[in-house]
Amino acid sequence: MTNTALLETVSLKKIYKVGKVEVEALRGVDLRVHSGEFVAIMGPSGSGKSTLMHLLGAMTRATSGKVLIEGVDTASMNDAERTAVRRKKLGFVFQKFNLLPALTARQNIEVARKIHGEPRTHESDSYLAEIIGLLQIEGKLDRRPSELSGGEQQRVAIARALTNRPAILLADEPTGALDSKNSEVVLKMFQELNKRLKQTILLVTHNPELEAYTNRLIEMRDGLVVSPKDS
């Protein structure tokens, strides 16, 4: 593994103001994620892991510090620049599936493809077909979300998140709305995507069972990383 990180934070801080009170959500986080890793960030409620995910996902600005994606600092970018990073470099999976209810699974995936500006080519079609095959949703594409189980909906959401071939797939509590059986299925799907496609995945969770599926665990507490930041 090279010393160059795909994703890196340096002394990352985030302070929220609640009235006259300042809440220090992140207190100087340093971590590194290398290309091809499957990393879990774990911590109790209030540990700062969700705030960290928002900063890694270029959804908000840091108070200070850096977020480097492929060597480019996104922490101080303006809104338009952060939007471009999200479209080109990142994929997102959330606890809520956020599928459009009136559209089929196939249409939900195609909408994301258009939003990301991914052209229809033989190569991109083959890539998407491989993703759909790995996620085992080939027979579900013409069904609407209401006709799918929670696990199936989440697998469609994962396919949607991968349409732009992201450098990093960010998943925020992706099994939080699933029962234990579907949680296991979805986690195995993430594992397959990581192993077979070398997809870099960073997953936030409070579920300690997830550690068995990942390459590395980063533990957070009180706005700080309390386990080794690098592998």
Image (cartoon, helix red, strand yellow):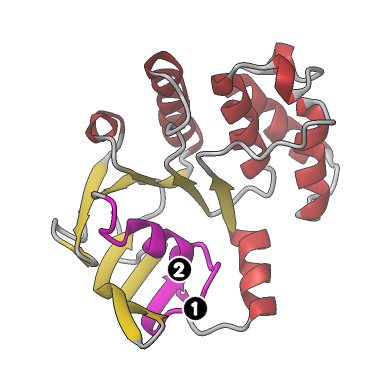
Residue 128: quadrant of the picture: top right
Residue 136 x %, y %: 60, 16
Q: Is residue 52 magenta?
A: yes
Q: Is residue 142 left or right of residue 52?
A: right
Residue situated in front as seen by the camera: 49 or 3: 49
Q: Is residue 187 magenta?
A: no
Judge the density around disc 1: few (<14), some (14-19), many (≥20) Cα neighbours within 10 Å: many
Residue 92 x %, y %: 56, 49
Q: Describe the element under mark 2 as helix, strand or loop.
A: helix
> Which numbered marker is on residue 55?
2
Count numbered badges in the picture.
2
Point 30% across, 36% down: residue: 214
Point 36% across, 88% down: residue: 20
Q: Describe the element under mark 1 as helix, strand or loop.
A: loop
Point 84% across, 31% down: residue: 102
Q: The residue under label 1 is which amino acid type?
A: Arg
The magenta stretch is: 45-74
N-term mark: 2 or 1: 2
> Which numbered marker is on residue 61?
1
Q: Are marks 2 and 1 in contact (CB under 8 Å)?
A: yes
Judge the density around disc 2: few (<14), some (14-19), many (≥20) Cα neighbours within 10 Å: many
Q: The residue under label 2 is which amino acid type?
A: Leu
